[in-house]
Amino acid sequence: PSQHVMNKLQTAISALYAYDETPDTTDPYENVIKSLSLIAKLPLVIAYGYLKAYKPQAKLVTPPSTMSIAESFLYVLYEGATPNPFDVYVLDLCLVLHAEHGGGNNSTFATRVVTSSESDLYSALAAAVGSLKGPLHGSANKKVMEMMSDIMAHVPDFKDMAALREYLLKILKKETFDKNGKLYGLGHAVYTKSDPRSLALIAYASRLAGEKSRQSELDLYFAIAEMAPVLFQEIKGNDKVIAPNIDFFSGFVYDCLGIPEPLYTPIFGLARSAGWCTHRIEELVSAKRIIRPAYKYIDA
């Protein structure tokens, strides 16, 4: 009954343990097969979880087995309406781009930690989902959309660059929006010069914006992406580069596809599940020892 789809996803993954005849095996080959089976179920788990929570009268459908992960997700979310092939392609691209980027992220590490104890696949992925649910990890595009809504409310003329500059400065000075002084979707811990995932998505975001009559809105994103780094350096007094990351555009893309905000982080989990499973199998094959961190306490 939870309203949070991430909790539904975590619970469902844990429950799937009960429907596996050999859930505790650490055999790498069997874990590949189980991973494929689990990933295949996630579009339905996520879409059903959303519909039951937010649209209780929705028609629940089962996608044909010939559909891809992206197509089956949209088919269920659209309650049986056939999704546009281009929309399917763009969502598939988003899933690929979000699947993994090196393994140094919080949820992938959680997967490896649980796997290192020789726990089961379902426990490992449930832990990863719990990590991804945290707002510091999995809800970046949600924060971008909240920030953009706030900016559009205060700068209704998207072509007024002076007003936009003034409002962005207020955000950076912690005078408005959430008063954290952050421009969400700009900068990345790993991609410090530019985010290649963002560059891969921009062309498709532009085509979507044209088809959905939202080009002026996307132009605002581009204006902020160009203006914000200069203002950031001005306020912070350094030359740090804060290029747009993939989350700067992905929320806009999801919105154009008719995907509601409560599904943004679960879709991230759907994409990242491939990376989680891959890292689990690598841990089973190559590590063979438990991850046991040490803590060093210092005086504050």
Image (cartoon, grey):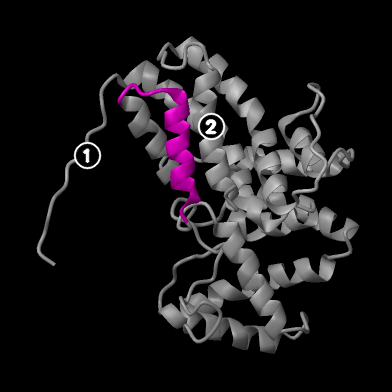
Query: Based on the displayed image, in which of its 4 quarters is residue 287 positioned?
Result: top left
Amino acid, disc 1: Pro
- The answer to the question of whether label 2 and label 1 lie on touching residues, with beta carbons closer than 8 A, is no
For marks 2 and 1 on the same chain, the one whose residue lies earlier in the sequence = 2
Crowd class of label 2 (few under 14; some 14 to 19; many from 20; radius 10 Å): many
* Residue at figure coordinates x 49%, y 31% from the top left: 14
Viewer-closest of 200 and 208? 208
Task: Measuring from the top left, give residue 65's x and y in whole percent.
Answer: 78, 21
Label at residue 13: 2
Q: Quadrant of the C terminus?
A: bottom left
Image: 157 above or below 104: below
Tell me: 44 left or right of 139: right
Identify the magenta region: 117-134
In the rendered image, residue 126 lying in the magenta stretch gets the answer yes
Q: Is residue 102 visible?
A: no
Viewer-closest of 95 and 56? 56
Tell me: 215 left or right of 146: right
Image: 298 above or below 58: below
In the rendered image, residue 41 lying in the magenta stretch gets the answer no
Q: Is residue 7 visible?
A: yes
* Residue at figure coordinates x 38%, y 16% from the top left: 285
